[in-house]
Image (spheres, grey):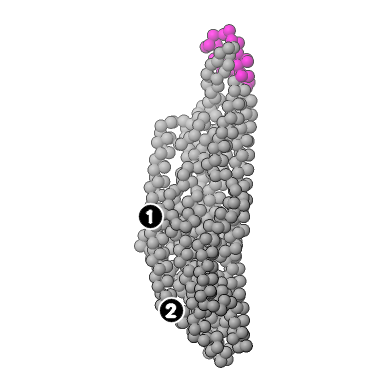
Amino acid sequence: MSSPLVLLTLDELHRCLRAPWLLVGIIVLSVGGWTAIHIGERDFAEQRNTYAELLQVRLRAQLAIAVTTGRSAEPGLRVVRPPNPGIVLVQGSDRLLPAAWEFMPAGTEALVPFAPASRLLGGSSLDLEVLTRLAGGLLAIGLGLWATLDDRRSRWLEAVQALPVSSRTASLARLFGGMLTLALVVAVWWAAMSLALWSYESRELVGRLWLLAPATLLSLQALYGLAVVFAMTIRTQFVAAVSCMTLWTAVGVWGPTAIAVTAELALPTAPLMRMERERRQQYEDDFDQMRNSVAQHLGARIPANLSPPVQAELAEREFSSVEVEWQSGLATARKGAVELEDAWRISVQNQQRLAQSLAWLSPSTLAREVLAELAGTGRHENEAWLREIDAQTDRLNAALFDNRPLVNLNVPIGRGGAAMMFTRHPPKKFAEMPLFEQTIRSTGSRLASAASGLVGLVVWCLAAILCAHVATVQTLHDSVD
């Protein structure tokens, strides 16, 4: 024989499923999911075309110049980032990651990111995260509001007193019924999107899609619990409805944008392009100063009364005496550029930490971070790419930019000067340069990246449902009095 809690929960589930507007909501979510996947597939196809074009540009650069000199940007050494299939589900931070990186003497510079097909509120494309936050959040809050207001209209608060169950059992049954309703909504919604992925022949993304379901459900259940709290504690129906809509607007619509803007205002940082420009200018100033110093020291070793061919031959022999100064000057210029970039990165990391801390204030913002991490388009994915680019930068600096095969100097001799080139070692071909190695992140690493956000969603869900339970029980007790 089933317990009263199970029977009342099933009764609440049946009541919620009979609501006509719920079916409309499921249809909207399903159609929206198909649309989001269509946009994601279109973005992915466009990025694949851009990726192929960038590879062709790199290949043409390698064929046009047989060897590398390290004197300027080397398009033949570009790292071109392959499109991330996770953008079909969630755009996340992928839109902030460059499509390719250019290696040059002053350091690595980012090329423009892949361009998404469309933009919505907060700079996001229409994807599952946006759909969950806006349409899904509205449905969850609407379910909590509707269930509570319907209980008042049907005098459920008075009728439950006649049942041989405690107020706590009746409250839990009501809440569990709503939570099960949301679970069924997410299941149907996800099944529809799985069919969409199959229709686009993106079957490999179906498993990753279902990895997003628990986080989505937790965020919706947290909003459902908060709506019940508002509706139960505010006795006026109109005020309760306005309060729930305000909740949806604050948490789902403006919450993520407000948190990002707050972090930017509290800890402002310079744009990446400005940092790259300042770093390049500083490196070039230090490099020019070093080169002029080396040229003067070399010129002091060459008599002015010799013929130009003899001066050139003598300079070739004497260059080894100033080569140490050349290498030391390059190291000093590199150190200054690295220190400037490191200071900028620290400021960016501090801003990101603040934004991550503020994200705990909103379940929708937490869900945004978690969904991106699970889809493989989150902040940790970007950081993994940047670590690998940094490693490639260090390899190329050691092999080329800080160990240049050719040195050009305008050597002052007497009252004149001569432009001279010195060969330190034979230039290398592109095939001899260090290869870029990309590490593919596994499902386990994505789960680990999302772990703290998932914990936050669990905390939000439990806290919201507990508060809703307390508010419902208190309302039942007040109705008895």
Disc number for residue 19: 2
Q: Name above or below for residue 402 compared with residue 272.
A: above
The reply, left or right, for residue 421 in relation to residue 357 is left
Amino acid of disc 2: Ala
Which residue occupies the foreground of this view, 283 or 22?
A: 22
Q: Write the start and end of the magenta stretch as one range.
A: 296-322
Q: Position of residue 172 (x, y in %)?
A: 57, 80
Q: How many marks?
A: 2
Label pair 1/2, CB-CB below 8 angstroms? no
200 up-or-down from 268: above or below: below
Chief SS of the magenta region: helix
* Image quadrant assignment for residue 446: bottom right
**Where is mark 1, residue-wise?**
42
Q: Position of residue 119 (x, y in %)?
A: 44, 54
The residue sitting at 56% across, 79% down in the picture is: 235
Where's residue 314, x and y in %? Answer: 58, 14
Which element carries disc 2, helix, strand or loop?
A: loop
Q: Nearer the viewer, residue 363 or 193?
A: 363
The answer to whether residue 153 of the structure is visible from this angle is yes
CA distance for labels 1 and 2: 35 Å
Q: Quadrant of the C terminus?
A: bottom right
**Location of residue 475 in the rendering, given as x and y in whole percent from the top left corner:** 59, 82
- The mark that comes first in sequence, 1 or 2, is 2
Q: Residue at x 57, y 37 (%)?
A: 278
Query: Which residue is at a point 52% across and 86% down the rendered structure image?
Result: 156
Assess disc 1: are there few (<14), some (14-19) or many (≥20) residues with their C-alpha within 10 Å of its C-alpha: some
Residue 303 lies in magenta, yes or no?
yes
What residue appears at the point 51 percent right and 65 percent down from the top-left corner? Answer: 249
Label drawn at residue 127:
none
Q: Find out whether residue 449 is within the magenta segment.
A: no
Q: In the displayed orientation, state which residue is furthest to the left.
A: 199
In this rendering, the answer to whether 301 lies above or below 189 is above
